[in-house]
Image: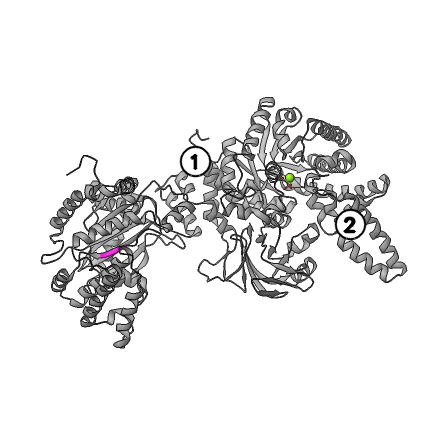
């Protein structure tokens, strides 16, 4: 009967896999297997609509659906020739919850529903195994009491253990029938004591209570929390599947098992799984007996094995994905209890996607969407073994993915020294500065107590592909004492630790790691991804080596070459300092001349390595004080020198005095908002002139060698049209002069970063002079929110996210509402003035999948990220395009 309100109960033959929203994932798949003619134990499903209605109209719903349930059960009795609550062979059922999306946290399964003092005896006779019947009953009472009646299972466990102790038994399955009888009596007493009522013996009452418990489980705290974390709507509701019980533990012609249609670790195309003869599902999970590999089934139950293999094939052909299957064999007959898309490792995900594509089972688009950007990330870096038991010492920000093991060092020089000796070290610092770069190079991993996702340590580590945990504020680093304290523990120099930059975790000791695998399948998958992506992926890279790596990962250009990084390496820093401290223009020009020679070499290397692709070279950006030693270090050294006067010490002291004076004169309260970027270029034009000369000398030289080089000169932190106009003029004038000198011409562009709100708001004005825009979303986020990128993440941002003041860390995931709005304005206004303006992004968001999706929406030409993130970005760009309904290229 279908009541006037609608239909709430579906037999398996009425459903299919497309009906997940109504029948839940589990129910829809059972129905689909039935439709495919597979041996599924008969059953029916109460819809998610009923659950939704239950929550809107609790009083009447159960009465409303009950006649339908009774009719469905009557049909079940007919097909199974069993009787619910009586008969020669009593009908027992399992009751399970099943939401439209897989959702742990909901009600656990109830098995053997329908047992009572009477039916248990009937089952004993029918099965010829009284012990089995009693044990099923005992388990049922415990399960039902736990999940439906809400009774703590501790008391049941206590009684069970007491029985075993009294009889000197180790395992549950050794408990004889008479002891089980006694146990059942005692179990019922627990129920009476806890609820004040007898354990429900009426199977109909059992069923009604179980169904209601499933509905209730939709809104338990566990389920609500899980939904919130996984962004699952609260409105979906859960279905209830009610399925005839089949038993795998009635003898040696019975059994139970689980298998995957392909290997879930490697992706190999081969049935993979295990089974146990004469057992129930629980026995497999409990681990009392060791299950046998599925291959053994071929010899133990050849007919069943052949049938299972055929079904596995059929299911894969139907679902076009690797299936995770549960089955039971009851007295020589195979039953399928469940099928669903199987969970798999990142490596298996790639293998399966590529081989299913090659087998013609799935399309290229499907293959690409089968692998997530997070899985790609796992494949690119060493990871903490997911099976390792972890005792996490401290948590910080997941600043650069991958994991590393090494001994703790607190000093960059020592890291370099030990690194040269082939030792694995983790550089631990309150924060890193350009002075530490050699230590970052040498270390296996980096750990800082301060600084956020765009801190020096984080940016450099990502560029180098090294794991980094930053902003680990719980660490109290004592540099003088060569140790750090955290949670009452002390970790000293030389102690081994593991840093997990993918999850921001720090552990003491050596945790086993899994190796990365950038294999042929991976390359094939990314090649497929490129066919769908609209966005190009460029790289942020500062050296020829970065450029080569970027190309090998598939970059189509360099979107940001931070020239300051070139000045931070060993022998260059002193020259840079010489230039900054110079007392006269002549002195400064001498130092700049030396720097120009070095820069020309840099640009020759990087332009050459990227031949055929654009290289966006950003002129000097950071405040000059970043290249100078710290004030307190200088003062300390000065004290040492003046305490021990000598001609050499006096000379050094004089030099330090000069440096100190410069440091003090450059000191700013807010250096990030201060004298940096294009402001430097306007006030000290010599620096930019030197860089522009180096760029065009290098480019002309390469053009003369017949190479196709494409330098784009990028101006940082532009905020006014006049800044843009003047500096563009400077580039054009010098470029013309140098090309004339070399008697050749170079194709180049001049453009700007958009990294302060004003730049976005006057994009139309800037576009009059700029041929390209590149969104520097690190600074744009900092200046739009007014959050210091060096401080906010360590101080309050994590708390803001925890308290839901912000949905995400905006330095990690682009803030579409605010920063994104500015980007939109800049894109629209810029294009209005210059329709072919080239627009990309080079802030750290360029490697973040959610932010990449927004860049796709904005119609940017490219995203630029560190070379190691390129594969992630290529896949994310493809996903964004595939998710977009607009016509694909
Ligand atoms: C930015 O601000 O987004 C950017 C790429 O520049 P930097 O991080 O070097 O300031
Ligand atoms: Mg910037």
- Which span of residues is magenta-colored? 106-111
**Residue with the mark numbered 1:** 882
Percent position of residue 134, x then y: 18, 65
Q: Single out the residue that lies furthest toward the top.
A: 833
Predominant SS along the magenta part: loop
Residue 768 seen anywhere in this rendered image of the structure: yes
The disc, 1 or 2, on the residue closer to the chain's N-terminal end is 2
Q: Can residue 554 be seen in this view?
A: no
Q: Residues within 10 Å of mark 2 (few under 14, many from 20)?
A: some
For label 2, the residue is 574
Residue 44 or residue 459, whichever sits in front: 44
Q: How is the image coloured?
A: one colour
Residue in front for this viewpoint, 876 or 351:
876
User: Badge 1 local density, few (<14 within 10 Å), some, or many (20+)?
Assistant: many
Ligand 2 located in image quadrant = top right
Is residue 545 or residue 882 the one in the foreground? 882
Q: Position of residue 12 (x, y in %)?
A: 21, 44
Dot 2: what SS?
A: helix
Where the N terminus falls, by quadrant? top left
Residue shown at the point (88%, 57%) measured from the top left: 650
Place of residue 888 in the rendered image (x, y in percent of width and height, measured from the top left): 44, 31
Looking at the image, the residue that sits furthest to the left is 88
Q: Where is residue 759 in the image (x, y as percent from the top left)?
A: 64, 30
Q: In this view, does 690 lie to the left or right of 720?
A: right
């Amino acid at each position: 009967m279908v009541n006037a309100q609608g239909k709430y109960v579906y037999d398996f033959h009425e459903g299919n896999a497309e009906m997940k929203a109504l029948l839940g994932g589990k129910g829809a798949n059972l129905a689909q297997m039935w439709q495919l003619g597979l041996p599924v134990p008969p059953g029916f499903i109460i819809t998610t609509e009923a659950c939704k209605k239950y929550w809107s109209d609790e009083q009447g719903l159960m009465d409303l659906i009950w006649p339908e349930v009774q009719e469905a059960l009557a049909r079940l009795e007919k097909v199974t020739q069993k009787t619910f609550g009586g008969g020669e062979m009593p009908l027992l059922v399992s009751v399970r919850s099943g939401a439209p999306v897989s959702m742990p946290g909901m009600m656990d399964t109830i098995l053997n529903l329908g047992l009572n003092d009477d039916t248990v005896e009937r089952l004993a006779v029918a099965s010829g195994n009284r012990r089995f019947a009693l044990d099923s009953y005992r388990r049922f009472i415990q399960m039902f009491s736990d999940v439906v009646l809400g009774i703590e299972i501790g008391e049941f466990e206590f009684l069970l253990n007491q029985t075993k102790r009294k009889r000197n038994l180790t395992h549950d399955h050794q408990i004889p029938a008479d002891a089980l009888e006694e146990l059942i009596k005692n179990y019922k007493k627990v129920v009476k004591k806890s609820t004040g009522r007898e354990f429900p013996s009426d199977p109909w009452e059992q069923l009604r209570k179980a169904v209601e418990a499933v509905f209730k489980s939709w809104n338990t705290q566990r389920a609500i929390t899980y939904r919130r974390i996984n962004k699952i709507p609260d409105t979906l509701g859960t279905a209830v599947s009610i399925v005839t019980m089949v038993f795998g533990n009635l003898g040696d012609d019975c059994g139970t098992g689980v298998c995957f249609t392909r290997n879930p670790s490697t992706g190999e195309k081969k049935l993979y799984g295990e089974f146990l003869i004469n057992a129930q599902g629980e026995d497999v999970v409990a681990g009392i007996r060791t299950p046998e590999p599925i291959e053994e089934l071929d010899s133990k139950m050849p007919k069943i094995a052949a049938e299972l293999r055929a079904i596995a094939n059929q299911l894969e052909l139907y679902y076009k994905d690797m299936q995770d299957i549960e089955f039971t064999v009851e007295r020589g007959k195979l039953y399928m209890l469940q099928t669903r898309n199987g969970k798999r490792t990142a490596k298996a995900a790639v293998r399966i996607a590529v081989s299913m594509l090659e087998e013609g089972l799935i399309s290229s688009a499907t293959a690409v969407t089968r692998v997530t950007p997070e899985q790609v990330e796992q494949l690119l870096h060493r990871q903490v073994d997911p099976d390792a038991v972890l005792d996490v010492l401290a948590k910080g920000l997941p600043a650069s993915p991958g994991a590393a093991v090494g001994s703790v060092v607190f000093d960059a020089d020592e890291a370099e020294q030990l690194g040269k000796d082939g030792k694995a070290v983790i550089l631990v610092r309150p924060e890193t500065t350009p002075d530490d770069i050699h230590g970052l190079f040498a270390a296996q991993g980096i750990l800082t107590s301060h600084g956020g996702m765009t801190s020096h340590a984080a940016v450099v580590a990502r560029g180098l592909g090294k794991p980094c945990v930053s902003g680990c504020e719980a660490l109290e680093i004592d540099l003088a004492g060569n140790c750090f304290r955290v949670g009452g523990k002390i970790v000293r120099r030389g102690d081994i630790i593991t840093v997990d930059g993918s999850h921001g975790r720090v552990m003491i000791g050596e945790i086993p790691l899994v190796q990365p695998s950038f294999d042929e399948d991976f390359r094939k998958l990314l090649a497929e991804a490129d066919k769908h992506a609209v966005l190009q992926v460029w790289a942020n890279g500062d050296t020829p080596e970065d450029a080569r790596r970027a190309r090998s990962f598939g970059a189509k250009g360099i979107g940001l070459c931070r020239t300051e990084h070139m000045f931070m390496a060993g022998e260059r820093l002193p020259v840079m300092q010489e230039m900054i401290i110079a007392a006269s223009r002549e002195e400064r020009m001498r130092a700049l001349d030396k720097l120009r020679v070095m820069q020309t070499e840099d640009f020759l290397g990087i332009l050459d390595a990227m031949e055929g692709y654009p290289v966006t070279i950003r002129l000097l950006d950071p405040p000059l004080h970043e290249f100078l030693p710290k004030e307190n270090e200088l003062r300390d050294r000065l004290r040492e020198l003046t305490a021990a006067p000598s001609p050499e010490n006096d000379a050094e002291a004089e030099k330090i005095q000069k440096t100190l004076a410069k440091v003090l004169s450059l000191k700013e309260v807010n250096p990030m908002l201060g004298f940096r970027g294009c402001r430097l270029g306007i006030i000290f034009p010599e620096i930019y002139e030197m860089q522009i000369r180096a760029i065009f000398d290098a480019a002309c030289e390469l053009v003369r060698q017949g190479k196709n080089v494409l330098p784009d000169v990028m101006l940082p932190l532009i905020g006014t049209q006049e800044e843009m106009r003047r500096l563009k003029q400077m580039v054009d004038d010098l470029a013309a002069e140098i090309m004339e000198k070399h008697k050749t011409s170079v194709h180049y562009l001049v453009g700007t970063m958009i990294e302060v709100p004003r730049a976005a708001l006057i994009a139309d004005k800037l576009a009059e002079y700029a041929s390209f825009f590149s969104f520097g979303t690190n600074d744009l986020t900092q200046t739009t929110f007014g959050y210091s990128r060096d401080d906010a993440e360590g101080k309050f941002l994590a708390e803001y996210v925890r308290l839901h003041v912000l949905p995400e860390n905006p330095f990690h995931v682009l803030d579409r509402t605010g920063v994104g709005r500015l980007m939109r304005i800049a894109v629209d206004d810029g294009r209005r003035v210059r329709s072919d303006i080239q627009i990309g992004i080079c802030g750290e968001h360029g490697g973040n999948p959610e932010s990449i999706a927004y860049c796709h929406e904005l119609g940017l030409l490219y995203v630029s990220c560190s070379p190691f993130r390129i594969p992630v970005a290529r896949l994310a760009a493809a996903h964004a395009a595939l998710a977009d309904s607009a016509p694909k290229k």
